[in-house]
Image: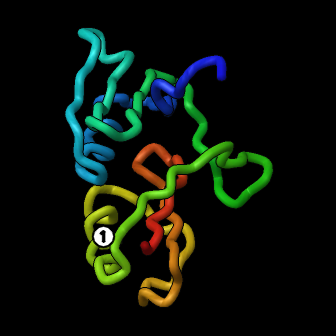
Amino acid sequence: MIGTLGSVVLDSRDPKALAAFYAEVLGGTITAEDDGSWVDLENEGRQNLSFQLAPDLIPPAWPDPARPQQFHLDIAVERAQMDAAEKRVLDLGAKLLEGDGDGARNWRVYADPEGHPFCLCAC
């Protein structure tokens, strides 16, 4: 082993706002550099997310291969809570990309407010 994964970093036009979105979805504590160009979402005992300023970000256009997702986050949600979780992420500014909305699937695909795909996955 060479090292351990320190953080997953997402490019963002507004790192503080995107960190606030994921703090509502995942919990955690937001810390930011004074200029806002780097923001961390720290989750004790879980993987950290970081957000770096990318003013010219062109978001993925999932599932368009011309602008691929490159990666996505899978967020585990209790199966009985899928509909409530969907409503909450949509209220926070996410956009539904794929899913039936009736709880029949084990996963649903969304874009966060910056366009990064993520999934809610029933566990």
- The number of numbered discs placed on residues in the rendered structure image is 1
Q: Quadrant of residue 71?
A: top right
- x, y (%) of residue 58? 60, 37
Mark 1: secondary structure: helix
Residue sitting at x 79%, y 48%: 66
Q: Quadrant of residue 98?
A: bottom right
Residue sitting at x 51%, y 51%: 73
Per the image, the residue denoted by label 1 is: 85
Residue 80 in the image: above or below residue 24: below
Residue 114 in the image: above or below residue 78: above
What is the three-letter code of the residue carrying label 1?
Answer: Ala
Q: Quadrant of the C terminus?
A: bottom left
Residue sitting at x 52%, y 47%: 116
> Which residue, as the protein is rendered here, is positioned at the far front?
1
> Which residue, as the protein is rendered here, is positioned at the far left?
29
Q: How is the image coloured?
A: rainbow
Q: Residues within 10 Å of mark 1 (few under 14, many from 20)?
A: some
- x, y (%) of residue 110? 48, 62
Q: Is residue 100 left or right of residue 75?
A: right
Closer to the camera, 7 or 20? 7
Q: Is residue 25 left or right of residue 94?
A: left
Q: Quadrant of the N terminus?
A: top right
- x, y (%) of residue 23? 26, 44
Residue 98 in the image: above or below residue 2: below
Residue sitting at x 32%, y 45%: 22
> Which residue, as the protein is rendered here, is positioned at the far right?
66
> Which residue, as the protein is rendered here, is positioned at the far top?
34
- x, y (%) of residue 63? 69, 60
